[in-house]
Image (cartoon, rainbow, N blue to C red):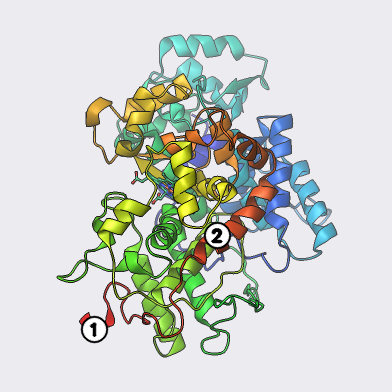
């Protein structure tokens, strides 16, 4: 049996085989923030256009990155054409007449050279384009394979569904038609969820390629395939993680390549972006480093840290009160209804606090400021916008479970309840709509959306059906099962959440309330059509939220440990 290289399918194979490979130091997606801030959005737009023009291009770009990384690391060697003195990889057997998408990469490169010459490497373009193409296509039916790559399987193999083999033989005759294409995933997509149909195909012996079917053929990977069949969300999650890992294979890194962020000072408010500029210039880069590592380890952590800042600010201001553990005198907010078994990220905050105190040589950065900076850095690490965080908050010496119960919005709220909840915190309708865009990342438990999928009518029925599958009625399943808040791109900070709402695919009742014939419909549509406006307004509203009742001057304290008030330390 000939070994074939089928882009997406072997990309999937990476889920099982990349673990354990040596990793090198790479900066996440804000690496080009200073020297070419538009780099990521240019790549994304070009990939979106290319995929719009030809859906198959998504798979081709993904495969290009994979074939690059697996030949001496992700160094764009695959892009080099042959010359009189040089024989490149493009004519290697697995690539010849098969790899494509070079023109898309070239057009991205020339656009980037035009706006920031000599900055963005071709290897990085490949990695980002691969990520964006998965997002653009939403990955199901992502690729097609040529007849030559699966002929032998459909005529000679036994671990194949006979009806499936027969139908494929119609597309791919025993001789001739070498370039006829067949879809690598036989399922018809219902909604834009990162589909696990590929794995269902394998279990039903309908893997098109030999190299696909070996993943489910009585061997060690059978159980992994089955777990992706049972849990599409797990697949989506693991896929994102594997992509990050693959992009780290032996890259060539410039020794000077360290991105820095500068923060210019601002005026009037008591908080200032440059607050630690003199006392601890390395504070912000230290926080960023820990956040970036945490998000690389687990992309969801970015969402969780973002939410922590929100849940801190909405309960008596941004004062780090949410971080306090219960004691005889602290009625911890962690036990309030909206937080219990739900908010997370406390270990990462501990890690940041330890690192930043060490870097500064003394505990001068407050836990409340750590939350504000970590929220921003998380958004950036997930591919979203950046903004200047105002700093100088101090930490509370109290917490209130009751206030957390009373002041945090809950998913059953109507639009008017959401608006008045935000008004109570000095935030307007626009802030509500734009900050809810945070639900472009992260996950929710069944218990948070069960009512919506079973009882509400303003929901896409296919979408509801899909969710009911993982979330049986009355907590019949595990109430802690998770679904992505933004079905299309759960670990990518983008404007897709608003598209979800317009298509009645908001996961929470409170999400869909923002687009349900009421006063906020217009804003939802605006952010859907204009992601730049969303990015810009998100930063502004985050600053506004971060300004809610900070403790400054002599109020509060700078905690030594974010989980405890200093007198208990
Ligand atoms: C408008 C009112 C809001 C409501 C009713 C709401 C409610 C919720 C609920 C119920 C969850 C899922 C919790 C679970 O099932 O465990 C959630 C998750 C999340 N929320 Fe909100 N939220 C709101 C606004 C916001 C805002 C303003 C932000 C940030 C600026 C935010 C950020 C997040 C994030 C990132 C997650 C995912 C967290 C993770 O995966 O760990 N939410 N929200």
**Nearer to me, 41 or 73:** 41
In the image, is residue 531 above or below residue 6? below
* Residue at position x 73%, y 57% in the image: 38
How crowded is the residue under tag 1: few (<14 C-alpha within 10 Å), some, or many (20+)? few
* Disc 1 secondary structure class: helix
The quadrant holding residue 399 is bottom left
How crowded is the residue under tag 2: few (<14 C-alpha within 10 Å), some, or many (20+)? many
Residue 125 rendering spot, x and y as whole percentages: 68, 53
Residue 14 appears in the picture as rendered: no
105 sits left or right of 316 in the view: right
**Nearer to me, 446 or 316:** 316
Residue 65 rendering spot, x and y as whole percentages: 61, 48
Query: Ligand 1 closer than 8 Å to the CB at disc 2?
Result: yes
Question: Which numbered tag is attached to residue 38?
Answer: none
**Nearer to me, 528 or 229:** 528
Residue 335 rendering spot, x and y as whole percentages: 24, 56
**Badge 2 is on which residue?**
542
Question: Which numbered tag is attached to residue 567?
Answer: 1
* Image quarter hosting the C terminus: bottom left
Query: Ligand 1 closer than 8 Å to the CB at disc 1?
Result: no
* Disc 2 secondary structure class: helix
In the image, is residue 162 above or below residue 532? above
Residue 485 rendering spot, x and y as whole percentages: 45, 40
Q: First in sequence: mark 1 or mark 2?
A: 2
* Residue at position x 53%, y 50% in the image: 435
């Amino acid at each position: 049996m000939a070994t074939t290289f089928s882009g997406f399918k072997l990309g999937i194979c990476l889920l099982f085989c990349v673990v354990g490979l040596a990793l090198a130091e790479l900066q996440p997606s804000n690496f080009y923030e200073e020297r070419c801030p538009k780099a990521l959005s240019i790549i994304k737009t070009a990939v979106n256009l290319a995929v719009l023009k030809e859906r198959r291009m998504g798979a081709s770009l993904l495969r290009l990155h994979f074939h690059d990384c697996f030949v001496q690391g992700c160094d764009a060697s695959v892009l080099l054409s042959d010359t009189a003195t040089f024989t490149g990889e493009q004519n290697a057997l697995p690539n010849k007449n098969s790899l494509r998408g070079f023109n898309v990469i070239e057009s991205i490169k020339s656009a980037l050279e035009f706006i920031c010459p000599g900055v963005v490497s071709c290897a990085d373009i490949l990695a980002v384009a691969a990520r964006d193409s998965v997002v653009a296509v939403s990955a199901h039916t992502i690729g097609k394979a040529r007849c030559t790559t699966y002929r032998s399987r459909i005529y000679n193999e036994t671990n194949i569904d006979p009806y499936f083999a027969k139908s494929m033989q119609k597309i791919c005759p025993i001789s001739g038609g070498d370039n006829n294409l067949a879809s690598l995933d036989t399922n018809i997509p219902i909604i834009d969820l990162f589909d696990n149909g590929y794995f269902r195909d394998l279990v039903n012996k309908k893997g098109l390629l030999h190299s696909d079917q070996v993943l489910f053929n009585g061997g060690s990977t059978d159980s992994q395939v089955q777990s992706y069949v049972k849990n599409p969300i797990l697949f989506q999650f693991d896929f994102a993680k594997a992509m990050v890992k693959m992009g780290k294979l032996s890259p060539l890194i410039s020794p000077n390549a360290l991105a820095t962020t500068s923060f210019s000072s601002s005026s009037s408010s008591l908080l200032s972006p440059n607050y630690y500029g003199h006392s601890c210039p390395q504070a912000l880069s230290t926080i960023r480093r820990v956040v970036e590592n945490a998000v690389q380890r687990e992309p969801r952590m970015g969402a969780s840290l973002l939410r922590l800042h929100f849940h801190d600010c909405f309960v008596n201001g941004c004062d780090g009160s949410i971080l306090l553990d219960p004691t005889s005198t602290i009625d911890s907010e962690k036990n309030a209804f909206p937080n219990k078994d739900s908010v997370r990220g406390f270990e990462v905050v501990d890690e940041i606090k330890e690192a930043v105190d060490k870097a500064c040589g003394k505990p001068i950065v407050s836990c409340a400021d750590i939350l504000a900076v970590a929220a921003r850095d998380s958004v950036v690490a997930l591919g979203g916008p950046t903004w200047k965080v105002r700093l100088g908050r101090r930490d509370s010496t109290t917490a209130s479970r009751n206030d957390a119960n009373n002041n945090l919005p809950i998913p059953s709220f109507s639009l008017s309840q959401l608006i008045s909840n935000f008004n109570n915190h000095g935030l307007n309708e626009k802030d509500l709509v734009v900050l809810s865009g945070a639900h472009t990342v992260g996950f929710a438990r069944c218990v948070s959306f069960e009512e919506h999928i079973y009882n509400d009518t303003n929901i896409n029925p296919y979408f509801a059906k899909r969710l009911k599958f993982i979330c049986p009625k009355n907590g019949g399943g595990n109430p802690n099962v998770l679904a992505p808040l933004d079905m299309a791109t759960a670990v990518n900070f983008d404007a897709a959440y608003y598209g979800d709402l317009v298509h009645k695919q908001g996961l929470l009742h409170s999400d869909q309330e923002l687009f349900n014939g009421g006063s906020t419909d217009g804003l939802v549509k605006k952010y859907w059509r204009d992601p730049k406006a969303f990015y810009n307004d998100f930063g502004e509203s985050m600053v506004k939220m971060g300004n809610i009742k900070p403790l400054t001057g002599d109020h509060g304290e700078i905690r030594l440990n974010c989980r405890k008030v200093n007198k208990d330390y």
